Amino acid sequence: MDKVDKVFSEPLNEVDDFNFDDKVADVFPDMIKRSVPGYERIIRHLGTFARLFVTDSSNVYDLGSSLGAATLSMRRSISASNVKMIAVDNSVSMVERSKKLFSAYGSDIPVQVIKQDIETVEISNASMVVLNFTLQFIEKAKRTDLLQNIVKGLNPGGLLVLSEKIHFSNPATQKLIDDMHLDFKRKNGYSELEISQKREALQDILIPETFDEHRNRLLSAGFRSADIWFQQYNFASIVAIK
Ligand code: GEK
């Protein structure tokens, strides 16, 4: 059973910036499922993408891997041989917990867990790279460099799956879909206090962009295609192929 997320349930005098610390890592599976519509479905389908795209003797990267849900889903579905997986996160709390999870689930495919900023990680011989709700935490001005680094390290035909909270340029659409997301959180048991305190904590930390902004950046970084394969409300997942 996942431990229930109560991180923002008590009134706080001052809401600090959101931080992926022990408190968050302890309840992360519950927090992300109750906050991100479609999360479990996306995780499941990362396995399908891995089965289709991961090639023999290549590397698979999970950037911003948290507790490793994406890596575990891909690892279960990879049929190619001599594959190496690399999971990268800059939170000690996440990295330490994910190492235990990777060894708890047996597999012949090795996972190297690296505690590092994804902006400085070296990517090479990759058949698949995942940014599952991570690019949104990178400064906007640094996103192009990161994507160019990923394109450089992907093999031709290689896949990037980019999942993000997205923004809508039409204010009426933005309000409608934001309200639908708030309703999703209420239905999942979050109180108004929890919703508003978490929102404040994430305000300058999670910066969403429109699908067009993502697509234009992906294409100008060197991807051949960039299209949405899944969307629920303001959460979308994009497949970009080199
Ligand atoms: C999943 N992908 O379960 N360098 C490395 N890691 C970072 C950086 C950075 N610059 N910035 C943030 N992170 C996961 C979910 S969560 C999404 C990803 C969310 C890490 C951060 O420590 C956290 O673990 C992760 O990115 C974002 O499929 O909480 O909304």
Image (tube, grey):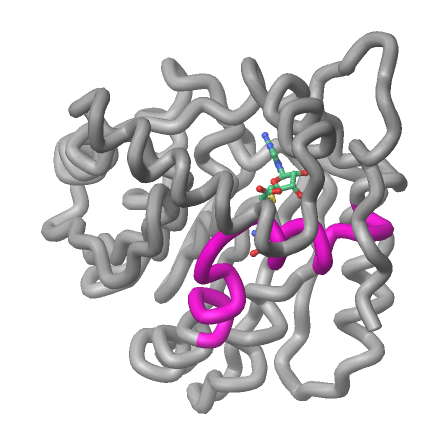
Q: Residue at x 55, y 38 (%)?
A: 121
Query: What percent of the width, then of the height, locates residue 209?
Result: 31, 27
Q: Is residue 125 visible?
A: yes
Farthest residue in the top direction?
14
Quick one: 136 or 195, which is closer to the camera?
Answer: 195
Q: Residue at x 16, y 33 (%)?
A: 212
Quick one: 165 or 187, which is closer to the camera?
Answer: 187
Query: What percent of the width, then of the height, locates residue 57?
Result: 44, 77
Q: Is residue 154 visible?
A: no
Say above or below: 30 vs 127: above
Q: Quadrant of ligand 1?
A: top right
Q: Residue at x 70, y 23 (%)?
A: 197
Q: Residue at x 12, y 52 (%)?
A: 225
Farthest residue in the left direction?
224
Per the rendered image, the range of residues in magenta is 25-44
Quadrant where the C terminus sits is: bottom left
Quarter of the view holding residue 239: bottom left
Quick one: 154 or 214, which is closer to the camera?
Answer: 214
Using residue 198 as the reference point, say whether residue 134 is left or right of it: left
Say above or below: 46 vs 34: below
Main SS of the magenta part reads helix
Using residue 140 as the reference point, say whether residue 107 is left or right of it: right
Say above or below: 147 vs 225: above
Quadrant where the N terminus sits is: bottom right
Query: What percent of the width, then of the height, locates residue 102?
Result: 76, 71
Query: What percent of the width, then of the height, locates residue 141?
Result: 37, 14
**In the rendered picture of this protein, how many numbered marks are placed on residues?**
0
Asked if the stretch drawn in magenta spans residue 39, the answer is: yes
Quarter of the view holding residue 145: top left
Using residue 64 as the reference point, say whether residue 43 is left or right of it: left
